[in-house]
Image (tube, rainbow, N blue to C red):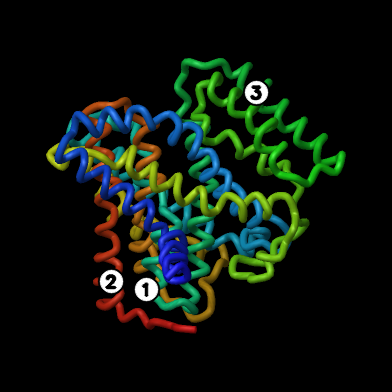
Amino acid sequence: MLTRAKGYINFLLENSLFLIVGTFVGLVWANVNHASYERVAHQLHFVVNDIGMVFFFAIAAKEVFESILPGGALSSPRKAGMPLLATIGGMVGPAAIFIGGSHLVNRADLVHGWAIPCATDIAFSYLVARFAFGSKHPAIPFLLLLAIADDGLGLLVLTFFYHSGQGSMLVFAGLVLSSIVISLLMKRRGVTNFWPYVTVCGGISWLGFYYGGIHPALALVPVIFSMPHETSDLGIFAEEKEDLSDTLNKFERWWETPVEIILGLFGFVNGGVVIGSAGIGTWLVVAGLLLGKPIGILGFSLAGKLFGFNLPNGMRWADVFVLGCAAAVGFTVSLFISTVAFPPGKDLDMMKIGALASFAAVIITFIFGKLLRVERVRG
């Protein structure tokens, strides 16, 4: 019985189902008793969004950082060229549709949310792609590279385009630089336990982000880049990573499970919106994700041919479009950017519903997978 229960928990963790469950509970509660949901969600909001999500973005930053190390998937122009162009297309396409649509319907006030449909939820997109393509199809590592690069660009977008304007950039620079210097000094002194980096350096950096007017959920990103780490990357699928004992990998292994629980709480706190709140903002987000993502990814990938980049062996242009459909699941990061871009109110609720509705990409992926005759490659 205990073994079976443990297996169920591991399945939930590996497939980010805690996030889905948390979102579902919040959605149902908000539509049954909105007042009581708002009271509970409000009490948890700061702890989950401003503190708990620090570790989610830290693990995302770790994946980005490792991918640019020697041997990493994005370590050379030749290896990174096509996925990076696809990533840029997967952000430009949705942003263009969102911004153009906002002006078309005379809602220029919504333009600030342009980054909401630019996000790709790496966990769910990967899960959808595996079902559509099979575990050994070359589209799978291509999608992962795209999603990792998307995370990297997303962190930059959050930092530079969603500054509250109320903090001091001098305080931000001073405290964040101090956290990096302390981290590098600890690294030089041979400190290999990740807790001092998280508590001391992360704490100083968090204060810098908070008082600098930049969302503090990004606070561990600069610290991640200065922790002791391996000098090269073994690759996305390398099982040997489980045996690595450097500080950065130990940090990730320790926080993997807590982060999934944090994501469950994040889904609950942010996913509780009244269904009737859907509006023009909802459709702008949905159009950006479901149309802009696959079109942008395919278009910029085709342009990559002009620069001499090629698709992986065994991958067709039709596969790129279907992969773009899978990448249109924005969910987690789209939901997060919504809460940063808009204050509580009708506009925020519209955007949140759009982020939740991005799961329609699952159905679209399978439809186009059938129409374009995607060949499933299993291990």
Which of the marked residues, 3 or 2, is nearer the chain's N terminus? 3
Residue 342, image quadrant: top left
Q: Is residue 81 left or right of residue 198?
A: left
Q: How far apart are marks 1 and 2 (CA)?
A: 9 Å
Residue at 67% from the left image edge and 23% from the top image edge:
175
Residue 244, image quadrant: bottom right
Which of the marked residues, 1 or 2, is nearer the chain's N terminus? 1
Type of residue at label 2?
Phe
Type of residue at label 3?
Ala
Q: How far apart are marks 3 and 2 (CA)?
A: 46 Å
- What residue sits right under mark 1 in the picture? 131
Q: How crowded is mark 3: few (under 14 residues within 10 Å), some or many (20 or more)?
A: some
- SS state under label 3: helix
Disc 3 + disc 1, Cβ < 8 Å: no
From this viewpoint, is residue 100 visible? no
- What residue sits right under mark 2 in the picture? 366
Q: Is residue 63 left or right of residue 272?
A: right
